[in-house]
Amino acid sequence: MPQLIHILGLPFLMCLIMGTILAYFGIHVLKRDIVFINIAVAQVAAVGSIAAHLAFEAEEDTLISYLFSLGCVLLIAAFYAIARRKIIQISIEAVIGISYAITAAAAMFLIGIAPGHAHAEEMLAGKLLWVTWPHIVLCLIVFTVVAFCLYLFRRPLSGISENYEDAITRGLNVMWWDFVFYALLGVVITVAVRVTGVVTVFSFLIIPATVSALFSTQWRLRMLIALVATTAASLGGLLFAYYLDFSIGPAVALFLGVVLVITAMFGRFRRIHTIDKVD
């Protein structure tokens, strides 16, 4: 048991920290119908990091690497905010998909020409098993600041997530608040994806929020359900990876999927049982 805690303690703590902030963002993301925003923003952040490596031979966790990634994320946040308001011919989800395809191609091109490109590939894959206390502290600081901003701006952000057109009618500057939302999400993804990889971050963002949507429409209850799902999947995935010598990040993502399937089946059984009672 002490060895188990020693190996999996920090990865489990990191899963809980990231799962909490990403679950909140995930509820917003589902309401806004921008499911693939995480993958697109993560890819943009990767391009920034690889560019920093090319230009300055910056290592993964250096300040200049983070600054390049953050700069690219802020640019794409501004683009998405403008696109959602100004581009009416296609949906914002289509715009996000197109931007992902372009940045993915750019990332593969840069990885191919970058000296020491294995470093860039490692950055894309994540390193949850090797997470350290400095990673934990960095995430706590960044996510706490982001959470404070989300609390301060909760009314306009929630208003836009609930009803975009109504927010425009009420006179909200939707482009500005969309930029704020995308920028805050981008900051979280920039930090998180370096630790767990794109797939795991995407799973934390979407699956717990989806599980919560099966049972409630209230924000607080949805957050509670999402946190329970995150905790259960993280614990199950880490133990599965430990005992079967499996990669931790994919194992956690797999168990998030298992939790979603189980809860969906339970929700369907509950609805059928309720209908039978009524009949």
Image (cartoon, helix red, strand yellow):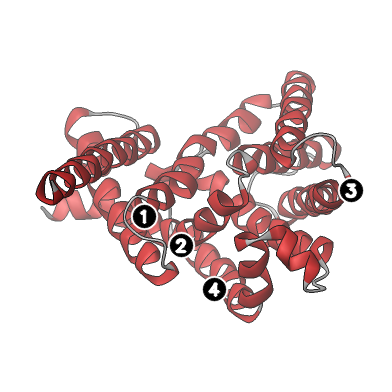
The residue mark sitting in front, 2 or 4, is 4
Q: Which badge, 3 or 4, comes first in the chain's sequence?
A: 3
Q: What is the C-alpha distance between the residues marked 3 and 4?
A: 32 Å
Tell me the SS state at disc 1: helix
Tag in front: 4 or 1: 1
Q: Earlier in the sequence, mark 2 or mark 3?
A: 3
Q: Earlier in the sequence, mark 4 or mark 1?
A: 4
Q: Earlier in the sequence, mark 1 or mark 3?
A: 3
Q: Which residue is mark 2?
A: 136
Label 1 crowd (10 A; few <14 / some 14-19 / many >=20): many
Looking at this view, is 215 or 150 the one in front?
215
Q: Amino acid at mark 1?
A: Ser
Give the spatial CA distance, label 4 vs label 1: 23 Å
Residue labelled with disc 4: 144
- Residue 185 lies in what quarter of the image? bottom right
Q: Earlier in the sequence, mark 2 or mark 4?
A: 2
Q: CA distance from mark 2 to mark 1?
A: 26 Å
Residue flagged by tag 2: what amino acid is it? Ile
Q: Are marks 4 and 1 in contact (CB under 8 Å)?
A: no
Residue 206 locus on image (x, y percent) = 47, 45
* Residue 28 point in image, percent of width and height: 56, 58
